[in-house]
Amino acid sequence: MIFCRRFAPLALVLGFCSALFAQTPNPVPPQAPVPAATHGKAVKTTPLSSPTWTEIKPEQQSALAPLQPEWQKMSAGQKRKWLEISKSYGKLNPEGQAKLQERMRDWVGLSPEERAQARLNFSTAKTLNPEEKQKQWQAYQALSPEEKQQLQKKAKASQPNSAALAAKPQNKIVPVKKTDPKPIAQ
């Protein structure tokens, strides 16, 4: 499988944060609705998930700056995942920091359908061994610009009209069965 040029680098660079792309249910604690500016019309308000942008540390805000416009729309689980990534931001060299923030901007710029496709591509890429990934990437890089464009058109035509979930969930939560120990017969 050859990956779309737009999604392959995103999946490869952010490989250390596979949990980020997982579709796991995360309960959102109830919050008070945020007051919205009204202009004589009834406005539907939505509760904010914690933490809000102003509640995170300044160094986290700096690391996650590209995500600020989307922050209030994210679930609490998504925010936790990004906050985990922000912990390693300070350990990166300046080039690594710039690259990570560029990837965040790319992610924020994707439509829900494109994000779903990126998750699907990422879960597929995780199943390949490194040699196979390298071989496919080199094959893609060897294509002419016209062939790449044809491949992109083909991929776009085969995309579903709705957001697709990843083929394999990244974090499968399995309920634990509680059993009472049987009394010992005496």
Image (cartoon, rainbow, N blue to C red):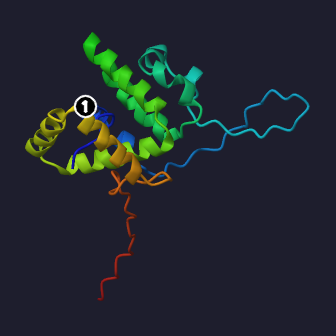
* Residue 46 on image: x %, y %: 70, 40
Name the image quarter holding residue 95.
top left
Q: Can residue 7 be seen in this view?
A: yes
Amino acid on which the number 1 mark rests in the picture? Pro
Name which residue lies at 44% across and 19% down.
60
Up/down of 149 relative to 158, above or below: above
Name which residue lies at 29% across and 49% down.
123
Up/down of 23 relative to 67, above or below: below
Q: Is residue 15 visible?
A: no
Query: Label 1, on which residue?
Result: 145
| Residue closest to the far bottom | 186
| Residue closest to the far top | 94
Name which residue lies at 57% across and 45% down.
28
**Local SS, label 1:** helix
Which one is nearer the viewer's eye here, 147 or 158?
A: 147
| Residue closest to the far left | 131
